Image (spheres, rainbow, N blue to C red):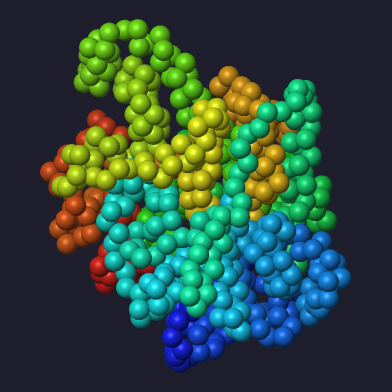
Amino acid sequence: MCGIAGFVTRSPGSPPDSLLARMTDPIRHRGPDASGFYRDPYASLGHRRLSIIDVRDGHQPMSSEDGALWITYNGEIFNHANLRPALEKAGHRYRTRCDTETILHAYEQYGPDCLTHFRGMFSFAIWDKNTRTLFCARDRLGKKPFYYFWDGRLFAFASEIKALLEHPAISPRFEESLLSEYLTFGYCSGDRTLFTGIRKLMPGHWLRLTPDQFEIRRYWDIPEPASQPPRDDRDWIAECRTRLEEAVRTRLMSDVPLGMFLSGGVDSSAVAALMKPMSDGPVKTFAVGYREQAFSELSYARQVAQAIGTEHHEVIMGRDDFFDALLQLIWHEDEPIAWPSSVSLYFVARLAAQQVKVVLTGEGSDELFAGYARYHFYLLNQRLLKPYRTIPAPLRDSLRSGIAATRLLNGNVRRKLQHSILGRGESLEALYLDNFYAGFSSAEQQHLLTAPANSTYDSYLHYWNARPDASPLARMLYADQKTYLVELLMKQDQMSMAASIESRVPFLDHPFVEFAAAVPDRLKLRGSTGKYILKRAVEDILPREIVYRKKLGFPTPLRQWLMEPAAASILAQLTDRDGLLAPYIDFTYLTGLLTRHQSGREDATDRIWRLLNLQLWGKMFILQKADVLAGRS
């Protein structure tokens, strides 16, 4: 795995040699093994290398045989060896055995259609110095990042935003129009970022810049569910197993040691169990837990490791470890950290990096096969909605208000009722998005923000509305795959690369994703059991209590940490009148929210987390406060 950066200008010039070094230096953690540069009057390409395939000869930027094309690339093409014979038959001559050269030859042979031949994870830029054309692409699901800046004269790109900020023409400014979406989701799900003018090349898209044209096109999308001939459930389950085995086997390609992140959930456990008999030597598994036992899944990971016979390693972290790492990890992530579990992921990646350079993970299964409880609860609420609407509207409104206001109900009971149609509005936004995604709901933002908020759900609703004829479950999964999952993959990439380790995601092998899209709803969500087909497919290789245990979702003790007196200095960051939040936030409302959380009257963990991360991110990247900058390394 690697880091890439570079820029192209429409006016020839001679930028100093140090500029590419400045851009690639902040991402040296992505590629500590080597660096390389290419420059001509119009283009500059930089590369940081983490050596995985063809360790000796795979240096970048790499050129084509005639020196016309130059590539800087981040990722792995798992089927590169299979593509090579046809390319050699077509007359292309190889100098290495690495996948980088296969991308170059495939682009020479097929043009942009080369992307349809690749199976893997990638982002890359290819510069044709003869035609002054830059061709950039990102893998189908968004496993590898690609950020860019374009102002009509300068095009700059990088694996991480911090590299772009080293270019003197790019200054960090807060994209305040995305504040509402950030407060809702904790991330920005479209192509814009929290930095004005810096965008993401979206998954499954390519970009081309010529001397007189700039264009972006989509080359792949998740297939729409199609009608299927009658098929026995056992056939679907058997195919799921076969395809997953192939996806895991494909991702064992490496010239360096591999390991496995093991949480003890069914997803990572299934990958580890399939990986074990395919590996020549011992399989090393890595797990992270907390000193607070109620939030630690280490016992489950140990159980799986013992059952399948892996060489197991653990790291245990506490409150001080968590908060001491926070500034450094916000710097690594470039934008505020969406989920506290990112910190845990970094700690287990750092543990694994002591012994391996590549790990497999269980990411992606929940979004393919309906693993989150929210899918079941929304469909249940939908089924109850029709009879519920027979109750007069004034009575429904009164019931909803009463549930929210009464203190007679047990807090847990009230929380559950507020997730049901009894306690919520009846629109998709109220019953699903505000219910299961929102940190700050649309209504609460009206109190928190000093100015009216923009629409918060535009990106999600774009994908929801893109498939009006699909089932509600299929629409939820598709929208999550295009928004929520993309952010999860960014977390996976950035936290693992912060420890200079590559992570691979078998569940997101694109043929497996296409298969999952065709699986009937009944095999994804059966009653309240999500991932039904996957669980049936692997129940013979894992302990039953692991396969069917309740999903915990990588919990953290953050709620109780923020209630402890030691959190006072952390929470004080939020009320800094010189911070990024100051122009946007009603401090009276914020103070009340913090008080209610610390007293235990309200669980505001997710909302405090989002505000804290935004404040620290703003001080580091936008305001560039010295005290925060000092804590990032």
Q: Position of residue 32 (x, y in %)?
A: 58, 75
Report which quarter residue 393 is drawn in. top left
Question: Taking 339 as reference, is 123 above or below it?
Answer: below
- The mark tally for this picture is 0
Residue at the far left: name it.
588
Q: Give the x, y percent position of residue 453.
A: 24, 45
Is 461 in front, or is 437? 461
Depth check: 44 or 184 in front? Answer: 44
**Percent of width and height locating residue 402:** 23, 16
Say left or right for 287 vs 111. left
Pick whichever, 41 or 316, lies toward us.
41
Which x, y percent locates residue 553?
51, 38
Residue at image coords 66%, 32%: 226
Q: Nearer the viewer, residue 73 or 291?
A: 73
Res. 353 visible in picture: no
Is 583 left, or right, of 60 in this rendering? left
Q: Residue at x 24, y 34 (%)?
A: 443
Query: In the figure, residue 588 lies in which quadrant?
Result: top left
Q: Is residue 283 visible?
A: yes
Residue at image position (49%, 71%) is 213
Q: Residue furthest front?
A: 212
Q: Name the image quarter holding the N terminus.
A: bottom right
443 above or below 427? below
Instruction: Give the image quarter of residue 526.
Output: top right
Q: Quadrant of the C terminus?
A: bottom left
Compared with residue 620, is residue 279 higher up or lower down, i.e. above or below?
above
- Determine the residue positioned at 21% across, 60% down: 579
